[in-house]
Amino acid sequence: MKNIFKNRLLLIIVLAILSRLLLLGGSLLVNNNLVENWVHFDGEWYIDIAKNGYDSEYPSVTPENLLCNEGTGFCQRNFAFFPLYPMTMNVVHEISGLSIELSGILISNIAFVLAVLVLFKFTKQVFSQKIAVISSILLIVFPIGYVFSAVMSESLFLLLLLLTLYFAFNNKYVLAGVSGLVLTATRNIGVLVLIPLIFLYWQQNKKEILLKQINWKIIVCMLMVPAGLIFFGLYLNLRVNDFLAFIHIQAYWEKPVLGLNPIFAIPFSIFDYRLEGSFRNHLYNLTWFAGIVILFFFSSKKKLLPAFLNNIFLWFIIPLTAGSMLALPRYICIQFPIYISFAKLLVKNKIILYITITICFLALLLLTLLYIKGFWITV
């Protein structure tokens, strides 16, 4: 058995699979129903899209109407959510005969294992095998990692994000463009992958760029990336006569809070916690916020990561433009440079590394328990 696991990639894949089996199987000890355990909050919207398609009209009342604040979902519409994940749920449902809900759970967990695989291969190329192993393990035991098993789009998004950068790093920009396209059809924040892609292309082709040699193939591939978002916008324009319906409908979730300008909403999110349900939830989210800010500045100062990876830390700012930290940990968990940075920090101290992995794993189990019980720790 020891000789088998000389292949570090095989070891990482086995650990990733076992972690998902542990979370899914363990949840059955709490409640013997996978669907009830792993379909909560935003997952219910994805199920609705997969089963019924997109809503065809806006609410007939304004966001300020009392009907919109009764917690019944009367005013919300499912075109706030992007289409790739529910589309894949339908495909798996048709092929396998599984229910839509179980298809979503299956997709999330398979996508997570594949994401761990790509993270390992990508990190090994950029840094070393040792960093790749540690980064992958940290992803596997990350405390918020329960969302990667739930009916949510995080696993699929993380996989596509990693594939986009992995292909680009290997100068396969056509494949990077294709994976970037489906990435932006998964969540609107995916369009930000253009920033690390541009950084990476500059790093790889400084001389040609300075000589003003235009690579039209690369430009076309870069333009492919936002196409997923654009296609969804065009569909919504036909469906509800609003290209930006996925943004405008947010007002019915009270986002941005008080109708704030996004620039003012970011600092406002630090102090306001109305959408988060309680001050306790806000402190929890605020802790993750502080952690990611500290890690970003430390990573920048110590030059732990190249620029094309380090800037991904800043993606967490975009959700804050709603004026709330609601679900911030979920937005943070897809920022894979976190795992690489910690791997580089911990690689030389095995004792601290083992303690960190153990604490993360125990926190993952605790937060998973809270999630399957329906606690408001992420949405």
Image (spheres, rainbow, N blue to C red):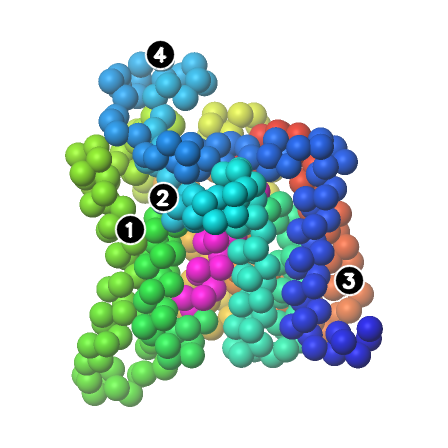
**For marks 1 and 2 on the same chain, the one whose residue lies earlier in the sequence:** 2
**At numbered mark 3, what does the secondary structure look like: helix, strand or loop?**
helix
Depth order, front residue of 362/175: 175
Residue type indicated by callout 1? Leu
Left or right of 116: which side holds 370? right
Q: Nearer the viewer, residue 91 or 194?
A: 91
From which residue to which does the magenta span run?
Answer: 150-165
User: Going 59% across and 59% down the picture, which residue do you hit?
Assistant: 113
- The crowding category of the residue bearing disc 4, from other C-alpha atoms within 10 Å (few below 14, some 14 to 19, many at least 20), is few
Classed neighbour count for the residue bearing mark 3: other residues with Cα under 10 Å, few (<14), some (14–19), many (≥20): few
Q: Are marks 2 and 4 in contact (CB under 8 Å)?
A: no
Question: Label 2 sits on what residue type?
Answer: Phe
Q: In which quarter of the view is residue 340 placed?
A: bottom right
Q: Residue at x 19, y 84 (%)?
A: 213
For badge 4, the amino acid type reads Leu
- Work out how far the residue at label 4 is from the one at label 1, CA to CA, in angstroms: 32 Å
Q: Evaluate if marks 1 and 3 touch, with contact meaning CB atoms under 8 Å apart.
A: no
Q: Is residue 331 left or right of residue 84?
A: right
**Residue named by callout 2:** 82
Q: Mark 1 points at which residue?
A: 229
Q: Main secondary structure of the magenta part?
A: helix
Q: Earlier in the sequence, mark 1 or mark 3?
A: 1
Residue 91 at x, y percent in the picture: 43, 48
Secondary structure beneath label 1: helix
Of the two numbered discs 2 and 3 in the rendering, the one whose residue sits closer to the viewer: 2
Name the mark on residue 354: 3
Q: How far is disc 2 from disc 3 in space, using C-alphas?
A: 38 Å
**In the picture, which quadrant includes the N terminus?**
bottom right
Q: Which of marks 1 and 3 is in front?
A: 1
Residue 378 coordinates in the image, percent (x, y)? 55, 37
